[in-house]
Image (tube, helix red, strand yellow):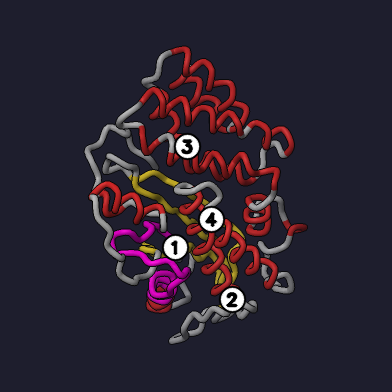
Amino acid sequence: MTKPLSSPFFNLATFRGWPLRIALVAFIFGGWTMPSLGQELNCTVTVIAPQISNVDVSRFDALEDGIREFMNGRRWTQDNFDFEERIECTLQLTVSEAIGSTVFKGSMQVQSSRPVFNSDYNTAVLLVNDGEVQFEWLDNSNILFNPGQHRDNLSSLLAYYAYMILGMDYDTFSMEGGTPHFLQAQTIVANAQNAGERGWKASQSKQNRFWLVENHLSQTFRPVRNCLYNYHRKGLDVLYTDAEGARLTMAEALIDMRSTNRIRPGSYNIQVFFLAKGDEIINVFGPAPEVERGRLLPILKQLDPGNIQSYDERLG
């Protein structure tokens, strides 16, 4: 999922997060140029159906093309992105069941990443496995989305995760900078409350689309959002020039999440955070002095109990 941080410089032109991204590039190079108009996402889409034998493969190929066009061809914000500034993300849709000829069920994995300053390393920001995916797909149809209504489950699913990707990315560049995008995702959830498909309602699960965005916007989870900013912008982005100071900031950001965990232990959002960041945290703090590792280790085991063995083996 992740790789070590010992990597050469990356092109500053790829530094994301409007308007901070553009301001940083202008500051570094001593000039100001207006960015060209462009879409925000560079989404690699894969649709697989390993258990489906009674549906022509070409239908899933067409679905893959349709999703790719929907994610990458639509302008999701009013911000301007250069081509190389687009947010790198992947979406894998696994179709596991065909209900009739046009309705399908399966799962979706959504990942996004952003570059780290002074390196060619891309850090994972969001990694979600959504096991409650059901949608209708008609041959030769277009995926259409209306922000004011729930037209169909496929368009709402894709738009929801597009806004979650944007929100998470923006949160890593400015404190709570992703709020407008999370609010868009929350509106999609609200519009889908009468949908027959699962994943949109609070009562259906504590780990679904409703709770992912609901938690993220709540006061209780503010330390998680603060961590996204401090861990990335004040930690990873300065790791090359000040490794000790960066690790201290990252450790403090992680430790601060304890307040959320005390109120909502084992919450979905904290699980999602460590699914994306667990290996990376080990890579960053593995070379740290014993006193640093010893201070952070019990916190990591408390916040991410599913990886206690890994933390003990590599940080203990």
Determine which residue is flagged by label 2: 147
Q: Secondary structure at mark 2?
A: loop
Closer to viewer: mark 2 or mark 1: 2
Question: Percent x, y for residue 219?
Answer: 70, 46
- Amino acid under disc 4: Gly
Determine which residue is flagged by label 3: 231
How crowded pointer 2 is (Cα within 10 Å; few <14, some 14-19, many 20+) is rated as some
Magenta part of the protein: which range?
64-92
Q: Residue furthest bottom?
A: 140
- Amino acid under disc 3: Tyr
Q: Along the horizontal axis of the image, is 205 left or right of 20?
A: right
Q: Is residue 81 magenta?
A: yes
**Quadrant into which the N terminus falls:** top left
Q: Along the horizontal axis of the image, is 75 left or right of 307?
A: left
Whole-number angstrom distance, CA of label 2 to CA of label 1: 33 Å
Whole-number angstrom distance, CA of label 3 to CA of label 2: 32 Å
Is there a contact, CB below 8 Å, between mark 3 and mark 4? no
Q: Secondary structure at mark 3?
A: helix
How crowded pointer 1 is (Cα within 10 Å; few <14, some 14-19, many 20+) is rated as few
